[in-house]
Amino acid sequence: ASLLLADYALTGTTDPEQVKQARGIYQHLAERGDRQAQVKLGYLLEQGLGGKVNMEEASHWYELAANQDQATAQYLLGRLNQLGQLGQRPDYALAKQWYSRAMSNYAPAAVALGFIYETVDDNYQQALTAYESAANQFNVIGEFDLGLVYEYGKGRPVDHDKAEKLYKSAAERGYPRAMVQLAGLYVNDKNLRNERKAVKWYKKAANRGDRDALYQLGRLAEQGLGMSKDPVFALSQYQASADKGNAKAMFALARMHQEGVGTAQNSEKAAELYKKLSQQGNGYAQYQLAMLYVKGALGDENKAEAKAWLKKAEHNGCVRAQHTLQWLNAETSEDISFIEPLSLGVRRAGL
């Protein structure tokens, strides 16, 4: 009853006094060995709710609960070690130990374990085993990550049929990333190609605000794949995706404004988008911005400004910028190229 009272006190509140009251109840019960109170007290200490953040104390209570087979506490201990919040650096070995203890009862632990095996250890077989454990518990992230293993052939042959099945299961339960990946299979796989299905899943993900889905919908609408060709709709999808920070959508949007596709031609709007991308160190955007100055699309020709952007683009690996910069330099150069005459005289021995 006390535990329920503390839980109720925390429900939907930001009142510091109520949080402090709940923390006191958890403390009282945790000291008497209640594993649920121990994990909840640990979480309050980790987050600094009802008092100061104290990772060491949080870890102490998590460990007491974890040693009573409280799976959430085992997962949270694994996370603290994975993120390096208990020492100078991450302790992946200890994180894996705690995740392994929790994985069969708590799917997020299985997902986290698979992530370490995949990205830190490059052990795809162990990663697959962990993701399978999560997927068998109907965890959508586990299904999605397992689908990626099969789609890209990580440590095993590519199997798009298995990937499709896993993505579809997660997508049907509302996971947007799985919707996007499933739609991608329907666009790119020659055996599964079905652009109408792709549009269906991109739309579902887009309705949940997924920026990649919005961008992909724009591409299909612009090309007329799986739907009628509609540059105005494409523009709106690119804009929505760009507003969420998708760089590819920003490029597409800049191109449409620059060329006047789906909207009136507007070099200033294109330049604004290229500048945003340029500030992120994007060499191709810097090159495109330079070309607007070269062509005088933003007013009079401004080769000095163009050269400044081309130098930045060249520095960021844009080969086209390097060639254009050489051309501009050659066009304005006053150097004269010549070949010095060769001396054909023969030196005789002794002279």
Image: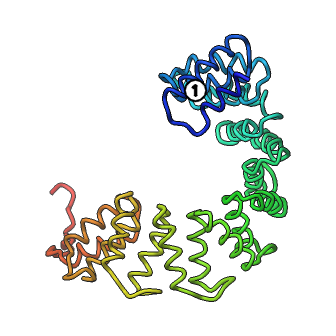
Please rate how many residues cluster around mark 1, counting C-alpha atoms within 10 Å: few if below 14, some from 14 to 19, many from 20: many
> In the image, residue 74 lies at what x, y percent?
72, 26
Relative to 1, does residue 329 appear above or below in the rendering? below
Residue nearer the viewer, 255 or 133 = 133
> In the image, residue 55 lies at what x, y percent?
55, 21
Q: Is residue 235 left or right of residue 342?
A: right
In the rendered image, the quadrant that contains the C terminus is bottom left
Q: Is residue 205 left or right of residue 342?
A: right
Q: How is the image coloured?
A: rainbow
Residue type highlighted by circle 1: Leu
Tag 1, which secondary structure? helix
In the rendered image, the quadrant that contains the N terminus is top right
Seen at 51% across and 67% down, the residue is: 241
Seen at 57% across and 31% down, the residue is: 83
Residue nearer the viewer, 152 or 237 = 237
Q: Residue furthest top?
A: 32
Q: Quadrant of residue 128?
A: top right
Seen at 39% across and 68% down, the residue is: 285
Residue nearer the viewer, 4 or 217 = 4
**Badge 1 is on which residue?**
44
> In the image, residue 267 lies at what x, y percent?
32, 80
Q: Is residue 232 left or right of residue 104?
A: left
Relative to 345, does residue 263 appear above or below in the rendering? below
Relative to 131, does residue 47 appear above or below in the rendering? above
Q: Quadrant of residue 167?
A: bottom right
Q: Quadrant of residue 45?
A: top right
Residue nearer the viewer, 195 or 52 = 52
> In the image, residue 202 lies at what x, y percent?
66, 70
Seen at 25% across and 69% down, the residue is: 307
| Figure label count | 1
